[in-house]
Amino acid sequence: MPYPEELVAPMRKELTDQGITELKSATEVEDFLGSEETSLVIINSVCGCAAGGARPGATLSIQAETRPDRLGTVFAGQDVEATQKVRELCSQVPPSSPSMALFKGKELVWFLPRHMIEGRDPQSIAFDLVQAYEEHCSSKAN
């Protein structure tokens, strides 16, 4: 059962205020990943490790010189259809939230699961993300 929107709205805003596109349906996910560009999809959640590590780590990482072409987010337990679509595209890894998935088109090329977020500071999470960007992305920040 979804949480009340007034509870999760600030958690959504933490990412959308950084220019990260909110994806709320399977169609939006399909369209977002429809090109051959690189895309980071953040699977957001209400848990403490999302607040203390995942969201701040993701926002720190997008300040790097090399980063994905596109940035998106789905909210586990809230945007059920969108989250399910992302998880289908990440079928080779167990579902977890929060987590982060890096795609080239619709191909998963890198994944950061919850167990690699829990107990870690945002800087360490951002470091892992930036390493993945440097390996898989070619876009430079403006």
Image (cartoon, rainbow, N blue to C red):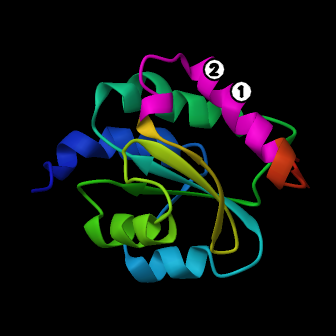
Q: Amino acid at mark 1?
A: Phe
Would residue 83 appear left or right of 53 to someone viewing this image? left
Q: Residue at image x 49%, y 74%?
A: 29
- SS under mark 2: helix
Q: Residue at image x 43%, y 71%?
A: 88
Would residue 94 appear left or right of 47 to someone viewing this image? right
**Res. 35 image quadrant:** bottom right
Q: Position of residue 136 (x, y in %)?
A: 81, 53
* Marks 2,1: beta carbons within 8 A: yes
Magenta region: 115-133
Name the residue beneath numbered marker 1: 127
Give the Cα separation between the discs numbered 2 and 1.
5 Å
Q: Amino acid at mark 2?
A: Ser
Magenta stretch contains residue 13: no
In the rendered view, tell whether residue 86 sits above or below residue 19.
Answer: below
Task: Say few, some or many: other residues with alpha carbon within 10 Å of mark 2 (under 14 / 14 to 19 / 20 or more).
Answer: some
- SS under mark 1: helix
Quarter the N terminus occupies: bottom left
Q: Position of residue 109 (x, y in %)?
A: 69, 58
The main secondary structure of the magenta stretch is: helix
In the rendered view, tell whether residue 92 sits above or below residue 11.
Answer: below
How many badges with numbers are in the image?
Answer: 2
Name the residue beneath numbered marker 2: 124
Magenta stretch contains residue 118: yes
Q: Position of residue 44 (x, y in %)?
A: 40, 46
The circle on residue 86 is: none
